[in-house]
Amino acid sequence: MDPLYLRSASTSLVISFDSGEAEVIHWGADLGPSLPDLAILGAPVTHSAVDGAVPAGLLPQASSSWRGRPGLRGHRIADGVPGYDFSVRLRVAEVVPDGAGAVVIIQADADAGIRVSSLLTLHDGGLLELRHTVTNTGTSPYQLDELATVLPVAQDAVELLDLTGRWCRERHPQHRAIQQGTWVRTGRHGRTGHDSSLLFAAGTAGFGNRHGKVWATHLAWSGNHEQFADTIGDGRTMIGGSELLGPAEVILASGGSYTTPALFAAYSDRGLDGISESFYAWFRNRPHHVLPSGAAQTGLSGAGKPRPVVLNTWEAVYFDHNLTTLIELADSAAELGVERFVLDDGWFRGRRDDHAGLGDWYVDETLWPAGLTPLIDAVTSRGMEFGLWVEPEMVNLDSDVVRAHPEWIVGPSVQSYKDGGRLPLEWRHQHIIDLVNPDAWQYIYDRVDALLRGNNISYLKWDQNRDLLEHGHAGRASVHEQTLAAYRLFDALKAAHPGVEIESCSSGGARVDLGILERTDRIWASDCNDALERQTIQRWTGLVVPPELVGGHIGPTTSHTTARTHDLSFRAITALFGHFGMEWDVRQVQGAEREELKRFIGIYKEHRGLIHSGRMVRADVADDSLMLHGVVVAAAADDPDCAPAVPGLTAALFALVSTRTSPAEQPGRVAIPGLDAAAHYRVDVLFPGPGDADYPHTFTQVQPPAWLESGATASGRFLAEVGLPMPVLNPEHALLLKITTA
């Protein structure tokens, strides 16, 4: 059988079938239009080893003498006795094209009664999508323990990058050397989790934003999971991930099947920015992607609309829901130029604080005797969309729905807690409603559907404020089925209300993955609006998720979560590189500060088409107290490494950010990468300028660099290789640069 050879956007995948199983020969750089005879790759056989070559299979198997982590783990239960067919010998039965860039590989072991179908798609932007489906073709039940999606990386991949974090400090990087053994990141939160690694990457020594080879994977799943790098004694390394199944959580009856979450994989020979380009291309080519109105000029497929300026009421009023106050807030927001007004927690029955009411998704008649209509009318009559906070997957014990249906709460016991069954410990005074129960699922669907049918709501902020621990249905582990049920809930509501956008807010950034992002229109990256913390959170979230899908808000002058105080310019420049908004009592913003806020709202509206369709560029700055990042006009189709130059138009926006004091007296010249080397550009400071209120706070210098006040003109090559001398920024301040073609 001829090898499988897929190519796209400087990436290729080669799979050989010569061993009888699907063996991944190469995943990485494009190998050109043809392949040699793969027989030249026959490996030596060493002493004290299996008498033959050991393939790096698409599903690594012990039956092929793979000594690392197997791709499939499980066993058959025959006549009530477990443990049979514990080791399968899968061999290729069929290879079937499945559209452009896609193929299905079917492997089977008739003796064990197991068939695995693998769907591989190499998307136009170079992103590889892989998922397996295992089917029990035997006559007795088969207990599935794990079905992993893995890929090999080249032997010059010697370093690992993954992400970790906590509430209000999500997605921070950690690095380590690749050594023999297995490095595993486990998520047991029942959701993706604040500490989940959004990306799991292997790369060449010292790889960075703009240099080095990188092989990276993402598991598109919103439940329990594992991501890992597995290096065996012969030097080969596999990276990938799997759903982490609970005890006996998936038992396949005869004819039953299980499909893995999709593993998305990207290769880059240009550092992490190349990885982002592959993910962004996939997102932006989805028909349902929310794109800016000018996106047609970029060649992207989605229709979309501009991402509206948001005002969320949480850090403005918290639980103090008063119609007069909220209309005043709407007036102030509209005057600033806000386009979407979102009413947060506190609008439904019994909800005066976070101890009661969750699950009772009825408008509180005592607060809203005329319903939400007066507020919605006030908001929409001022030209804004109305959005509403909900948390449909959670309940409080102090709620009408729990009093009526205590059996709808998930837990480890078969019995309801009213009948003596044990519940998981409370988390933020919350428990979880059992969406696996069809009656509970229907109740939640009906209540959210009624809210949307009965009110002019354009947007749902969908929260999920606790982990799913000891999560069970009828006494058995059920995170798997709960996650699928939640997906069905999103899908059904989207089908019934296609014009309503949904944000995944999971106590900030605890459910951020491509599984939930196939069903939602943005994520809330973190509950932390502290601009300093947000610089890191947004930078690493943006490694995978494009800025139009990442909510970024200006919070109050003093942060609600950290008590840090920042100038408006630093908060606004940070929020600008995302889906921009405010979570702030803007009634209190007056005078020069209000005019400055209006300016930033105008800057966002002027440039959101660029921010939400361009290439993300992150410079490798030697001084780690400085960050330089920006968005460059989307690259020309025939040259993915540089942006086209259109005379007189904005070519890029960059932010220079100082996170702390530097050991050096001055930053020196900082290179600005990502522009067309042959084109000439003008670099100007967009904010702050000498007349702006924050200007005196921004710099520590007697004299600025020569170009700062009048701008600089140079070629893209000069800016990338020589750079410009940057001003001495005070810590926790930023400079916004606008680059136009000269």
Image (cartoon, helix red, strand yellow):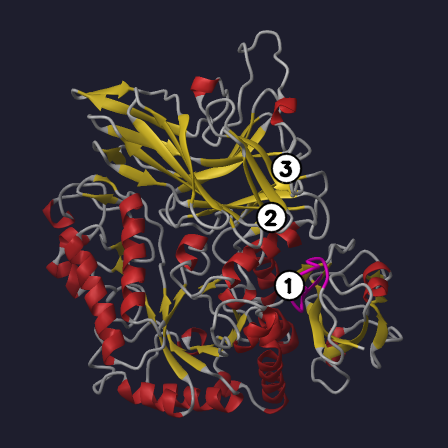
For residue 176, the mark is: 3
Tag 1: residue type?
A: Arg
Sequence-first disc among 1 and 2: 2
Task: Give how far across and how far down residue 227 sits, in percent.
Answer: 48, 39
**Residue 635 is one of the magenta-drawn residues:** yes
For the point 48% across and 30% down, the residue is 22
Position of 406 compared to 727: left or right? left
Separation of marks 1 and 3 at Cα, in angstroms: 28 Å
Image: 202 above or below 281: above
- The residue labelled by disc 1 is 615
For the point 54% across and 19% down, the residue is 54
Task: Give how far across and how far down residue 473 sits, in percent.
Answer: 21, 44
Q: Nearer the viewer, residue 703 or 489?
A: 489
Q: What element carries label 1?
A: strand
Image: 601 above or below 269: below
- The image quadrant that residue 181 belongs to is top right
> What quarter of the picture does the C terminus occupy?
bottom right
For residue 173, the mark is: 2
Categorize mark 3 by other alpha carbons within 10 Å: few (<14), some (14-19), many (20+). Answer: few
- The image quadrant that residue 107 belongs to is top left
Q: What element carries label 3?
A: strand
Q: Nearer the viewer, mark 1 or mark 2?
A: 1
Task: Give how far across and how far down residue 284 sits, in percent.
Answer: 52, 63
